[in-house]
Amino acid sequence: MGLSMNIVELVIVFIVSFLPIAEVRGGIPLAFYYFHNDNLMLAIGIAVSAIGNLLITPFVLFVLKYIDIFIRSSKFVPEKIRKLYIWVLNYVKEKSRKLKKYDIPALATFVAVPLPVTGAWTGSLIAFLIGIDRKRALIAIELGVLGATAIVTLTCLLGLTILKKIFLLP
């Protein structure tokens, strides 16, 4: 019973960590909720959360590439929408040229900040919009996810320690 329940909880942590907005900001606190009394399972839960979030970037960058191809070449996309789409991409790329030399540190920092809409999903979209090479984007975003994982884990540990002190818990 215990092991099968742990697997279900780990799958839930993985799914939450893969979802937009939640990512490790939701997965790690959930791992703490499920496994706060078992350090080994907590460590596994944090790792599962990080892995779930790390898998987002290759998936999103892959999908965005094919959405771009579809919009540019499909007969189903109206010409006005296609022109607007291309104009927006060109505008964003032109405005972001000044930032090119900072692309990896800036993108990694953006993703590492554990706030809503600053994770791997948004980082992947930004990388696509400003035209960062997929390999460079992948490195930057994955570094950011690892940074967010560390920040959220430390925040949860600190919060748990403070709550135990306040309520005099062992």
Image (cartoon, helix red, strand yellow):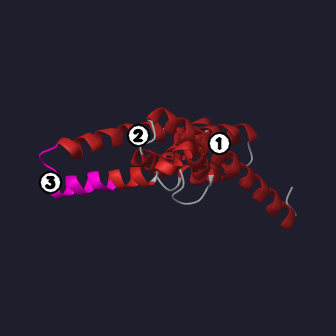
Res. 105 visible in picture: yes
Q: Are marks 2 and 1 in contact (CB under 8 Å)?
A: no
Residue at 58 percent of width and 48 percent of height: 106
| Numbered circle sitting on residue 61 | 2
Give the alpha-carbon distance from disc 1 to disc 3, as whole Å.
46 Å
The answer to which of marks 2 and 3 sits earlier in the sequence is 2
Kind of residue at disc 3:
Glu
Q: How many marks?
A: 3
Disc 2 crowd, CA 10 A, few/some/many (<14, 14-19, 20+): many
Secondary element type, mark 1: helix
- The disc labelled 1 sits on which kind of residue? Ile
Q: Are marks 2 and 3 in contact (CB under 8 Å)?
A: no
**Tag 2: residue type?**
Leu
Instruction: Tell whether 108 sits left or right of 83.
Output: right
Q: Are marks 1 and 3 in contact (CB under 8 Å)?
A: no
Q: Position of residue 72 (x, y in %)?
A: 22, 44
Q: Which residues are magenta?
A: 74-88
Name the element at disc 2. helix
Q: Note whether 143 is above or below 130 in the view shown.
A: above
The residue identified by callout 3 is 79
